[in-house]
Image: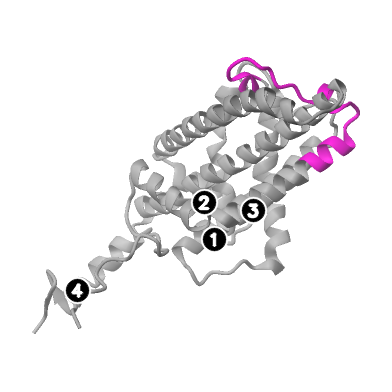
Amino acid sequence: KSPLKDLETPPDKRHTLRVDTIKSSGEIFADVFAIFRNYYSRLFLLALVSSLFYCLFAFSTATAKPTELFTFPSVLFGTVGEIEQFFVNQQAPLLPLVNLIAFGLLTLFGQHYVIKSIRPETSLDHKNSLALLGKFMVGLMAMQLILWTNNWYTLLIMVMIFPLPILYNFITHVEKKGVGDSLKRMVFLLRNNYGRVLGLFLLLLLLSLFFFLIVDSSLIDFFFTYISWVVYLEQSAMDQLSVMVLTFVSIFVLHLLYMLVISGLSIQYFTLREIKEADHLKEKIQNMGSGKKIQGLERE
């Protein structure tokens, strides 16, 4: 039997992500897509369920018809300019609560699959999930408050601040700390590293925006060009159906992209920890000279 037979892992097998080194943004990108490749069915199902939950409560509790609740301009990239309507909408008073619940569950399970990619034996602790979701509310409410500003400076604040609650939420999850200790830990990890975090967040945000633009523009064009030829309804009913379908798909894509962003920043947490504490480097130094091999050769 050849000793070289199992040197390489087949690409279709899941591999454990390494977090014992300081990773560049490119390496984190590769890790994020590895997670999506390994758990794509679960992540898609999660986004599907959360989108259905959002649409069910948004349309059932709204004080207006779907066409008055959400608008989808037929111009190129029109929905991006109206994206705040999914978070701040006077016609849907319970929308903030719906978003908190939906994004809380997306955060919980999205972070779980990051941890599981690093430690495959990890299982979700259902007993502590509610307590963990309660801690997440601090970070998620901060994000919701930023969206509530709904002004020209909202995007700037979002870019500068959003990485902080995402990192805070992951610290509460992986380190099992309380709210105060997690905030102190976040500040410690970000000291002299904020630029690194902001750079990765901007890259993930631009990538997410690019995907959303493609899906949004192509979907609206497809829907109004072809679906209306197949489904025969009165114009008013067709308009209501169009808004509901487009809302569901837009929220589905947004939820998927949110998990992409939190996956990237969650992986970067381990880089920040290695920069600050160098636990793995210290371990390698302590074990230096005690290995059984030197440059791949057996020690005598």
Q: CA distance from mark 2 to mark 1?
A: 10 Å
Q: Do the residues under discs 3 and 1 have CB atoms within 8 angstroms? A: no
Dot 2 or dot 1: first in sequence order is 1
Q: Can you identify the residue that label 4 sits on?
A: 4
Task: Inspect the image, locate mark 3, and give the three-letter code of the amino acid beneath it.
Answer: Leu
Task: Inspect the image, locate mark 1, and give the three-letter code of the amino acid beneath it.
Answer: Glu
Q: Do the residues under discs 2 and 4 have CB atoms within 8 angstroms? A: no
Dot 3 or dot 1: first in sequence order is 3
Tell me, for residue 45, which label it has, or none. Answer: 3
Q: Is residue 235 left or right of residue 213?
A: right
Question: Residue 31: image x %, image y %?
Answer: 41, 51
Residues 281 and 130: in front is 130
Question: Residue 165: image x %, image y %?
Answer: 59, 42
Q: Can you identify the residue that label 2 sits on?
A: 185
Task: Inspect the image, locate mark 2, and give the three-letter code of the amino acid beneath it.
Answer: Arg
Dot 1 or dot 4: first in sequence order is 4
Q: Do the residues under discs 2 and 1 have CB atoms within 8 angstroms? A: yes
Q: Is residue 210 left or right of residue 53?
A: left
